[in-house]
Image (cartoon, rainbow, N blue to C red):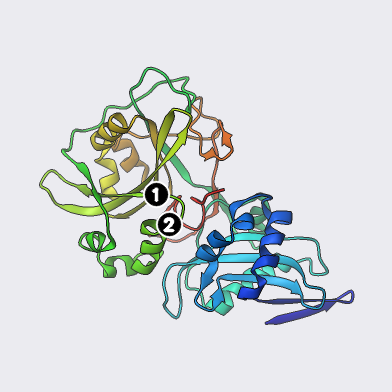
Amino acid sequence: MVKERKEDIMITIRRAEYDDISSIMRFMDEHWKPGNILAKNRDFFEWQFVDGDKLNMFIGIDEEGGTIYGMIGAIIYNKSANPDISGCTWQVIKSSNPILGMDLSDYMRSQLNVRYCFGAGLSEKAVKINQMLGCSIIAMDHYYRLADIGDYKIAKVADKVIPVAESTGYSLKQINSVEEMKQIISEEMLANCILSKEYSYIEKRYFGHPIYHYDIWKIVDAGGESQSVLITRDEVMQDRRVCKIVDHYGKMEDLGKIAGALDRLMEERGYEFVDIYSYGIPVEIYEQGGFVCCTEESSNIIPNYFHPFVQKNIVLKMVDPMMAGVRLFRGDGDQDRPC
């Protein structure tokens, strides 16, 4: 716990407690993202942040007056002494401490004994704070593959390009439990990654999500073997739907061999497109897999926001990890979260 007294207001920086939840939710609604699910749905807030008898959130608060001046949340991937995490829900308001945002971040890292902290989808305020900390800000890679259909309502397609991809014989087969996934991706494989995740996190995040339904697929090669897992989620608008690739575990080269499988899936389920945000996957893999790069200036519009629906290309910003071996997807942190 850190206390700073300035201008007769003492701001205490500490780990949030269960009794703070109502105040934090009110702060979120007033100062972070008004009306968002974390401010309105206590069950979902608790699902995301309650960790035993603690909250994975840190606050700057005037204990005497009860006013919260800042917060930062953490998505914790493992229970080790030095866990890997993603920061999230980072917000401060004007206070007697002009560097409260940086102080909260430093306090969170020290209290959790963080090994690595990487995340995506920075807000403009978080971008500024990270730049003040000397970090380099980059954009996640955004790739998509269109379905071969007559018209598009969710996407806006000015240039209908569907690259021809190699026929590999790869397929997608659904799995329905953590135990099935463990047969493909061992606990040791997860632990050796950056970010290092445990199956308790995977099970809660994808198999036990309280609102979203995720499809978990094993990628099966022509010989019937599987070395990776793909996680997707549908997004629906009126009578149309799209497929978001949310996460991937295992052999990243498999992402370049599933164009045919994705085309079949798009036809079976009536998707307009499948898209993916990532960091750390070589461009050559996406090009081999028949994906097309999407930037903010692209003539084709591949929407990312659906609640409310925004028909524009969205850039997801992140801090450059400056480290080899880091792979991030839109499912990391709390980027793929109900609004």
Quick one: SS at disc 1? loop
Q: Is residue 46 above or below residue 34?
A: below
Residue at 44% x, 22% y: name it: 152
Q: Is residue 332 above or below residue 111?
A: above
Give the image quarter of residue 313.
Answer: top right
Residues 198 and 317: in front is 198
Say which mark, if any, is on residue 213.
1
* Left or right placement of residue 100 versus residue 82 in this view: right
Give the image quarter of residue 204.
Answer: bottom left
Say which mark, if any, is on residue 209.
2
Check contact, mark 2 vs mark 1: CB within 8 A: yes
Residues 187 and 201: in front is 201
Q: Is residue 305 above or below residue 60?
A: above
Q: CA distance from mark 2 to mark 1?
A: 7 Å
Residue found farthest to the right: 7
Say which mark, if any, is on residue 152.
none
* Left or right placement of residue 128 versus residue 241 in this view: right
Residue found farthest to the top: 150
Residue 111 shows in the view? yes
Residue at 72% x, 71% y: name it: 60
Residue 140: percent from the left, percent from the top?
49, 47
Task: Tell how many labels.
Answer: 2
Badge 2 crowding class, 10 Å Cα cut-off, few under 14, some 14 to 19, many 20 or more, is: some
Residue 198 shows in the view? no
Residue 257: percent from the left, percent from the top?
24, 41
- Type of amino acid under label 1: His
Residue 262: percent from the left, percent from the top?
29, 36
Badge 1 crowding class, 10 Å Cα cut-off, few under 14, some 14 to 19, many 20 or more, is: few
Position of the N terminus, as image quadrant, is bottom right
Residue at 41% x, 38% y: name it: 143
Residue 27: percent from the left, percent from the top?
71, 61
- Type of amino acid under label 2: His
